[in-house]
Amino acid sequence: NQLLATTYLEKCLVEVDQAENGEEAVAMVAAKDYDLVMMDLQMPVLDGFEATKKIRENLKSDVPIVACSAHSLIGEKEKCLAHGMDDYVSKPYNKSELLSIISEWAKKRHHQ
């Protein structure tokens, strides 16, 4: 899934950085101004919920965070929104949905 999303994005000339775990994702957000963070909910060290909490509370960052999960359970999107994420996309990725969500949040970020 990570390779698929990266391939879609790089073909659209989007610069992609990848974190191996939630702790690394938080450190990356602390070090660089991102337009968007795609946050996998199932990561080692810190899961997506814990990493988002640190980004929001410790870093005080308002970077848009889009949750990614293979769990398409009813209420999962609402749970993600309640934990400080801005949107949700399920895996496996649908190319048009993924690109649409990323485009929407990137535009919002640049128009703030």
Image (spheres, grey):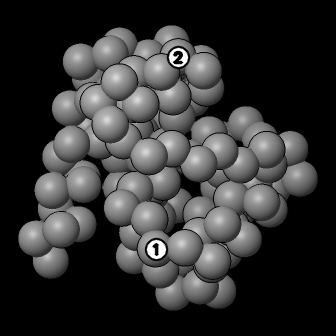
Q: Look at the picture and state if 34 lies above or below 60.
A: above
> At 35% from the left edge and 13% from the top edge, which residue is drawn?
94
Nearer to us in this view, 60 or 106: 106
Circle 1 packing at 10 Å, graded few (<14), some (14-19), many (20+), is few
Residue type, mark 1 in image: Asp
Q: Secondary structure at mark 1?
A: loop
Q: CA distance from mark 1 to mark 2?
A: 24 Å
Q: Secondary structure at mark 2?
A: helix
Which residue does the numbered mark 1 point to in the structure image?
33
- Residue 65 lies, in percent from the top left, at 44, 56
Q: Is residue 79 left or right of residue 63?
A: right
Residue type, mark 2 in image: Leu
Which residue does the numbered mark 2 point to in the structure image?
4
- Residue 16 lies, in percent from the top left, at 51, 44
Q: Earlier in the sequence, mark 1 or mark 2?
A: 2
> At 18% from the left edge and 68% from the top edge, which residue is drawn?
110
Q: Is residue 103 visible?
A: yes
